[in-house]
Image (cartoon, coloured by chain):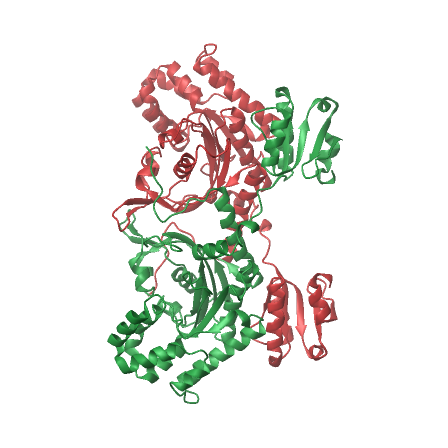
Chain colours: A green, B red
Amino acid sequence: MKIPPVKGTRDFYPQEMAIHNWIVDGWKRASLRNGFEEYDGPIFEYLQMYQIKSGDEIVEQLFSFKDRGDRDLAIRPEITPTLARMVNQRINTLPKPIKWFSVPRLCRAERPQKGRLREFFQWNIDIIGEDSVLADAEVIFTTVDYLREVGLTPNDIKVKISSRKFLSAVLKKIGISEEKLNSLYGLLDKKTKLPAEAFSEALIQQVGERISEQVISFMGSQSVTSVENIVKPDAGGELDIAIKELEDCASRLGQMGISDYCVFDPGIVRGLAYYTGIVFEVHDIQGDLRAICGGGRFDNLLHDFGGPKITATGMGMGDCVLEILLSEKGLLNQKISARSLDYFVLPVADNLLDDTIKLVAQLRTLGFKTIFSYKSGSLSKQLKTASERNAKYCIIIGDEFKAGDIVLKDMSTGNQKTVPLNEFLANPGKF
Amino acid sequence: MKIPPVKGTRDFYPQEMAIHNWIVDGWKRASLRNGFEEYDGPIFEYLQMYQIKSGDEIVEQLFSFKDRGDRDLAIRPEITPTLARMVNQRINTLPKPIKWFSVPRLCRAERPQKGRLREFFQWNIDIIGEDSVLADAEVIFTTVDYLREVGLTPNDIKVKISSRKFLSAVLKKIGISEEKLNSLYGLLDKKTKLPAEAFSEALIQQVGERISEQVISFMGSQSVTSVENIVKPDAGGELDIAIKELEDCASRLGQMGISDYCVFDPGIVRGLAYYTGIVFEVHDIQGDLRAICGGGRFDNLLHDFGGPKITATGMGMGDCVLEILLSEKGLLNQKISARSLDYFVLPVADNLLDDTIKLVAQLRTLGFKTIFSYKSGSLSKQLKTASERNAKYCIIIGDEFKAGDIVLKDMSTGNQKTVPLNEFLANPGKF
């Protein structure tokens, strides 16, 4: 009975697993050096968890099921609700600010397409309990710190930064009422994904022709201050504060040395419902791919999950788009080190297999990556296998073994020497 | 709105995550040094995958659901069916023997209890395409190699070894028909979990009183050869071959240096339906816990999943029972290294925050784990925080900074010295 894999999932054979591990290890290293600590939660939660504040798109894409007690559960489509639940559970004992990261496996019932699968991994970093824009800048820096490490330059990617607070202040000044904002965000977030005309028509339908022109003009602004051509901030007012925050953020990013990666872009809205402050996305410059990652400040989420009013800012980066980009830029294969092996032990005759097995076990116990061939074959055939397996050294168990000696062959130079087994085992690294 | 976690799942806060990572990293290291390569598959597969050969217990405990195309899917309760599917897909191109490992997240709809959760992680190692008992011995060695490394001795645990082939040959010789074997295995597997009387009664019901006495006597045998007091092997017959395999395995384990961990135990049956040869479980000597791990040879599984007849042998070890045992033996906390930090950068005044941020970003870019305090406070308060966070060094940004100097404080000795920033950044490790 042959059963296929489910569409939109991936099989990680050793070669793909090596790439996957290389990506995840990089995420973890970048998180740790930026002071984030790792956490994780369950792969499923109560269905309700995802019906509170996740965007409509996510709710539609849940894999939900019932347990034997008829409770409604769902596989996690994102980890932020779990983060909110976990932090709330220990809100009084966790020292603030909380800087946590995670690399959850997530599932969404999407139609599989380029850069979107039904199962994927997502790097998440979050800072909870720090109001200042410095925290937003630190999240952006950590993101760039990783992307720069894997070889992406300001010629490959840009961090596009805006602010929900800024967007809301501008839209209200243009004449859009508070209640209409949320549904308008949904449309604005789709601007780059829709043809210009379709976007314009949908916008006119929502806000009328006059206002729609101002919105489109605003979304094309090149700098924070150029918005003043459209609306004037009142000193100390909502818009004034939002502008200062964006400028403060830009200045922090400058201090951190990553200005060349960052641009202001009022077209960045973010689909999720819970953002409240600075928001950002990283895009490839060619613009062929979906966003590589996105994030921002969400000041109400912990409260929405039954906790106190405490501010948070974070970022999520999936592995699918990233891997496509790295592959297109030629940054992937060259970085994955070939499978390594310390010793390949080979007997020249069947009656030496027992001694071979004994030596292999000893070397493994000492911590060396060691294998042997189950099928004894000619010396040259076994050496070929050892070479294919990328072994650093071969240990030949031959006639010398009766006298207690092994032959050690350096596979990079081809040099070989006879060594007493006892001396070798006492300090294998010496030889 | 406060939503609790689902019962039987775990939240991994940073402290629990550190323990989890320590366990998983150990599994990975032991796998790699024993020549296994890592793979992984999707968290869900077609429901049917688990209805083919998994034991009844597993089928009952599936979390199943439908996708939007009305296909029946299930969260994986084990990874072996996925392994069979993946190997079959590339059976002609993968070099044999295939030695693979994985650390899948698995879910089973169990009643949560000590050592059994509804979500857990399981170390899996498998050797596919090697007939000889040497492969079974290598799987057992790799298992012990890990358990020994984490500090468990032959006084803590025992590997109990038997063989399905042996069991089947003995039972048939005692007079049990081939068809009855599978249902009998299910009962024999429960022997240690049931009260002696309940087991005996159930056994009598299945096979009658006379045979049941022989079965119980057989299951108490202390050695492979002592079974000859109950049934006599015919030279070259099924039982004779099975005995020779068990003896061969014991001899290999001796060569590998782990005889002191291993015992023969005909009471080991394994619950899963697909085992065909040598089977084993690791138990704590006190016998308070469920099996720490189990495994064995399954010669038909790949064929059952639509592939060729190719032999396989493997092992699965969950994290729950292992963690309880390690904790009870005091082998856990002392091994988890406290969270480490290279530098804690602290400004003595608010107006030095900009320079602090700049330096922090530079150190992180160089790969050092570096943090700073968002809240500027007194020097002594910040030093206390740095000490709590286990920082190796503090870098104090104070009055000297105007002259381009920093103060570097070694947190282990308390010594501090003034260093030019440029020299420090050119080679931080030197100071």
Position above or below: B180 against A5:
above
Left or right: residue B334 versus residue B308 is right
Q: Residue furthest bottom?
A: A235
Left or right: residue B67 versus residue A170 is left
Position above or below: B405 against B4:
below
Q: Is residue B12 visible to the viewer in this orientation of the structure?
A: no
Position above or below: B222 against A176:
above
The percent coordinates of residue B119 (x first, y second) are: 40, 47
The C terminus of chain A appears in which quarter of the rendering?
top right
Going 43% across and 19% down the picture, which residue do you hit? B217
Q: Residue furthest top?
A: B235
Instruction: Say which quarter of the image contains residue A423.
Output: top right
The N terminus of chain A appears in which quarter of the rendering?
top left
The percent coordinates of residue A87 (x first, y second) are: 44, 63
Question: Between residues A7 and B322, which one lies in front from this camera angle?
Answer: A7
The percent coordinates of residue B352 (x first, y second) are: 62, 78
Going 47% across and 78% down the picture, which residue do you hit? A246
Left or right: residue A383 versus residue A197 is right
Question: Between residues B114 and B384, which one lies in front from this camera angle?
Answer: B384
Going 47% across and 13% down the picture, which residue do you hit? B229
